[in-house]
């Protein structure tokens, strides 16, 4: 691990398709890619030296990377990742763990650890990564590093950005996401956005950028569709039950600046109250912002989920029952698809996996089954539909990105059981439904980075990018004023 790069890189090289003087959207910007993308002439190492040894170099570059290169940016190397993308911690037995520039002695988050760290440490302007959904990672490989490294991270809707040329994991959840970095200022409770990186979830592409404008610029380039200007939300829901999952932070610490910013910018928008027992007024200054019991809403509106609404001793007793059921459903499908994609290789080379990860991956494959796969896929469809009905084209749902600040390095997994279970419950909402999500840094709490997330309906990625760009400067001011 090189000290000067925080251990973020696993390989360095220079790759560009245009002159720095060309007038292109990303001209003059540098980026890195996670060690899971195909780069012509290079092997995607998947965070494991034996995988690197047993696979040939790629004969072409992944489309998402090509899009960024054609947009004028220069790639300077590949970044670290969790072994076989099998964790949200960002730790790697073989290559070491990238140093979190925003929280010394804390994990950087994974599996796109190097991508987040490279941007947070200002080693690149933005970085490209890929995230997979495995046993313990419920699709948070962009959102978790974004939160832990004090960055802004965008997870795009499932299927809107190409994941071709990325090592497949669990295709039912593969998508592309964006991530931005926020650098703490002199005040321990203030923040600023500086850098962004690109990373892919389950297999997910995403990026970290200097500011919200770069987040939007990279995002619209990857979306490859005509840019629209709409940014005003018609509905803003705060999932009050999800904020009760916070382990060491009060919900007000995460919501106050956000609510103040929304009311300051959009408070004149009037929206009717409704949806039965699920909604509660949060503000008397208009009805734009409402609280919602998301768990109850999901439980009542997703009928196929009932099969997984069971009392299991699987660590989810302190979570929201319906969201815990989503995790169980998703894990079933993840095991099934991971075994299809990588079971044969793991069977031949499991002795070359790192300690801890080896046992988890082998157990993951052993527990794979064909039963209830169609039911799990039905849940994906139903959840996407009910969130679309709730949010419509220009609504957003606010939840915590994760239950709290980044845990300490080398913490025994048994000590993180409740924290991880709550994290998976939060991360699985977007992963199962395939909706877009952005993780927004909210400065520091007791010297550690914290964040909030906004979700929008599937396909409303452009709107969410625009909203964040509009909202962020005011949010920054509110955080500084309040805290």
Image (cartoon, rainbow, N blue to C red):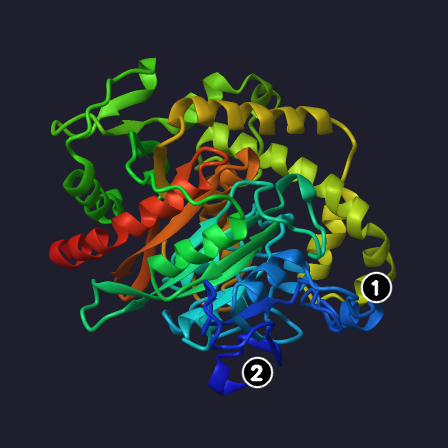
Residue 310, given in percent of the width and then of the height, sits at: 57, 25
Q: Is residue 247 visible?
A: no
The location of residue 426, given as percent across then percent down, is: 45, 41
Helix, strand or loop under label 1: helix
Tell me, yes or no, if residue 32 can be seen here.
yes
Label 1 close to label 2 by CB (< 8 Å): no
Residue that numbered label 1 is attached to: 349
Left of 386 or right of it: where is 176?
Answer: right
Mark 1, Cα crowd under 10 Å, few <14 / some 14-19 / many 20+, is: few
Which residue does the image show at 22% across and 57% down from the upper left?
A: 476
Q: Position of residue 213 (x, y in %)?
A: 35, 58
Looking at marks 1 and 2 on the same chain, the residue that comes earlier in the sequence is marked by 2
Q: Is residue 342 left or right of residue 284?
A: right
Which residue corresponds to the image point at 36% horizontal and 66% vertical from the top-left?
A: 210
Which quadrant does the C terminus fall into? bottom left
Q: Residues within 10 Å of mark 2 (few under 14, many from 20)?
A: some
The residue lying furthest to the top in this view is 276
Q: Name the quadrant containing residue 389.
A: top left
How far apart are labels 1 and 2 at the CA level?
25 Å
Q: Nearer the viewer, residue 430 or 97?
A: 430
The answer to whether 399 appears left or right of 73 in the picture is left
Q: Position of residue 31 (x, y in %)?
A: 51, 70
398 w.r.t. 10: above or below: above
Question: At 16% from the left edge and 59% from the top edge, which residue is drawn?
Answer: 480
Quadrant of the snapshot with the N terminus: bottom right
Q: SS for tag 2?
A: loop
- Point 26% across, 43% down: residue: 251
Q: Which mark is residue 1?
A: 2
């Amino acid at each position: 691990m090189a000290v000067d790069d925080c251990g973020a890189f696993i390989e360095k090289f220079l790759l560009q398709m245009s002159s720095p003087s060309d007038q292109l959207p990303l001209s003059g910007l540098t980026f890195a890619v996670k060690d899971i993308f195909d780069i012509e002439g290079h092997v995607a190492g998947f965070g494991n030296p034996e995988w690197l040894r047993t696979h040939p170099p790629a004969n072409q570059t992944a489309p998402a990377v090509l899009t960024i290169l054609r947009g004028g940016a220069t790639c300077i190397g590949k970044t670290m990742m969790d072994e076989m993308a099998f964790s949200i911690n960002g730790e790697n037995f073989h290559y070491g763990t990238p140093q979190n520039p925003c929280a010394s002695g804390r994990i950087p988050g994974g599996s796109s650890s190097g991508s987040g760290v490279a941007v947070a440490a200002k080693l690149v302007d933005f970085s490209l990564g890929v995230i997979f959904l495995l046993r313990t990672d419920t699709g948070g490989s962009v959102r978790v590093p974004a939160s832990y490294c004090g960055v802004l991270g965008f997870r795009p809707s499932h299927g809107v950005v190409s994941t071709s040329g990325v090592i497949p994991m669990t295709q039912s959840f593969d998508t592309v996401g964006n991530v931005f970095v926020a650098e703490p200022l002199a005040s321990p409770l203030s923040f600023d956005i500086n850098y962004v990186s690109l990373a892919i979830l389950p297999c997910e592409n995403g990026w970290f950028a200097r500011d919200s404008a770069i987040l939007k610029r990279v995002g619209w380039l990857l979306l490859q569709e005509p840019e629209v200007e709409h940014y005003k939300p018609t509905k803003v829901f705060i999932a009050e039950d999800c904020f009760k999952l916070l382990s060491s932070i009060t919900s007000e610490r995460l919501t106050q600046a956000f609510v103040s910013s929304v009311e300051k910018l959009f408070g004149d928008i009037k929206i009717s109250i409704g949806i039965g027992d699920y909604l509660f007024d949060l503000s008397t200054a208009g009805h734009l912002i409402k609280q919602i019991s998301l768990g109850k809403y999901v439980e009542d509106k997703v009928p196929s989920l009932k099969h997984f609404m069971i009392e299991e001793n699987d660590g989810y007793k302190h979570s929201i029952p319906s969201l815990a059921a989503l995790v169980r459903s998703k894990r079933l499908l993840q095991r099934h698809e991971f075994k299809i994609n990588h079971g044969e290789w793991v069977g031949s080379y499991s002795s070359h996996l790192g300690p801890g990860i080896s046992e988890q991956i082998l157990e993951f494959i052993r527990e794979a089954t064909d039963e209830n796969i169609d039911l799990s896929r039905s849940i994906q469809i139903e959840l996407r539909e009910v969130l679309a009905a709730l949010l419509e084209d220009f609504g957003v749902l606010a939840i915590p990105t994760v239950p709290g600040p980044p845990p300490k390095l080398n913490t025994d997994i048994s000590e993180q059981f409740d924290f991880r279970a709550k994290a998976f419950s939060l991360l699985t909402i977007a992963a199962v439904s395939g909706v877009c999500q952005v993780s927004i840094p909210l400065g520091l709490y007791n010297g550690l980075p914290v964040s909030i997330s906004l979700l929008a309906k599937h396909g409303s990625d452009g709107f969410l990018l625009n909203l964040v760009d509009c909202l962020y400067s005011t949010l920054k001011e509110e955080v500084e004023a309040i805290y």
